[in-house]
Image (cartoon, rainbow, N blue to C red):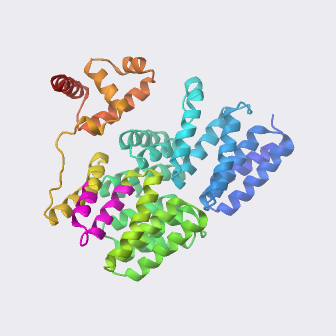
Amino acid sequence: ALAAPVVHGWVLLAKASTCDDLGQVQAWAREAHQVAIDAQDRDLELCALSTLGSALTAVGRVQEGAELLDEALAGALGGEVESLDTVVYTGCLLMRSCYRSADFLRVVQWAHALDGFIARYGCPYVHATCRASYGAVLVATGDWVRGEAELLAARELAGAALPAVRAEVSAYLADLRLGQGRVDEARALVAGFEDQPVVLPVLAAVQLAGGDVSVAASTVRRRLAEVRHGQLESARLREVLGEACLSAGDTEAAVSEGRHLAQLGATTGCHLIAARGERLLGRSLLTRAEAGSARRHLEAALGLFVRLELPLEVARTRQLLAEAMRAEEPEVAVAEARAALAVFEDLGAERDADASAAWLRGLGATAGRPGPKRLGVLTARERAVLALIGDGLSNPEIGGRLYISRRTAEHHVASILSKLGLRNRVEAAAYAVRHSAEGAEDR
């Protein structure tokens, strides 16, 4: 049986997991950590470190929080704990925190470190929020096929869970639907969760996309009044508020929001906040017909989004940059817009793709929308998988041939079908055989 102080420590972490006051979360995590040190309970100690790291990340102290999250998961994977649940807990919080701060390189690094654990015990993302965070990471980094599969699985896991859990899963899925241009579906997903803080940034974005500008601004302002200065959540909220101000014709307010965000990003060292601020500032200056200044800010935002490896945000920023370059360098502007359109189409961001294609047609340029896509859109690994599909191999057989798991093979197949616009394995096999024959003729 656990000693009374240790039980108290776990109760503190349980309370922290459902608390929106990040200052209080930090206090409880520090208290639980001290209890763990005194009781020499390594599981509680690492979980408390992870909770504290997550809270610090959320308030904009990203580097400090990341170091604690790394330490906690390293200890859990290093055999220092008695319970496998500690790996699940620390892995889940690291995944969620990395998504919020757009620290996807850290996710990739830890994903490799977790391979051995997964091979022996199974995937640690067994809880709905963890699975949803993993799906959201995949979506943000451009793997919408796998990301959607993980988000739908998370929705099933959420089932009859607490409203806060179901709200978080729905928010991630609604964000994907918004990116896909399926605004009505996004609205339906967040319906009923309007009182859940985690949903409000996405809800406001949905309201804005639906033309409810004043409602979106009201939603953002209400939440900003409750969010402490510097929290990562405020970046998305303030960008939506700035966009709402632009839609309402209040350019000065939008410029102010952009400058606020850019300064906050510089102060906290958070590239995601800085990128959102620079883009909003560039877009606002573009509305004021200050193309030169707008271009400088948009180029800064583009560099940051590229560094963060966020393809949708990169493409959206390229499209704005094209508009800024339209008068002075029309040929370069068309090239930027075409690059943006290619990404929108590869991702399946239909609303953005339609807008980009219309912008190109307005300049008298061809949109360049492709028909069936060529092999160049596939990664080297996906081309290898496609060749084996052409040979008639099943997913387990492909996994064995390429020394990857059956699940990984399934993910590659799903990605191939999506990227090439194919409906099933039969079409993929025919495509592989046809292109193999074309390659042989070329040789």
Q: Work out whether 262 lies above or below 251.
A: above
Q: Is residue 43 magenta?
A: no
In magenta, the rendered stretch is: 313-338
Look at the image and tell me whether residue 414 can be seen.
Answer: yes
> Residue drawn at (15%, 23%), measured in percent from left and top?
441
The residue nearer to you, when weighing 19 against 125, is 125
* Location of residue 389 in the rendering, given as x and y in whole percent from the top left corner: 29, 22
* Location of residue 249 in the rendering, given as x and y in whole percent from the top left corner: 33, 81
The quarter of the picture where residue 326 lies is: bottom left
The residue nearer to you, when weighing 113 against 295, is 295
Dominant secondary structure (helix, strand or loop) of the stretch shown in magenta = helix
The residue nearer to you, when weighing 70 against 202, is 70
* Location of residue 275 in the rendering, given as x and y in whole percent from the top left corner: 46, 63
Q: Work out whether 83 lies above or below 223.
A: above
> Residue drawn at (33%, 26%), measured in percent from left and top?
384
Quadrant into which the N terminus falls: top right
In the picture provided, is 365 more to the left or to the right than 224? left
> Residue drawn at (31%, 29%), measured in percent from left and top?
383
* Location of residue 89 in the rendering, given as x and y in whole percent from the top left corner: 63, 41
Quadrant into which the C terminus falls: top left
Q: Is residue 322 magenta?
A: yes
> Residue drawn at (53%, 50%), measured in percent from left and top?
103
In the picture provided, is 168 more to the left or to the right than 229? left
The quarter of the picture where residue 171 lies is: bottom left
The residue nearer to you, when weighing 368 against 241, is 368
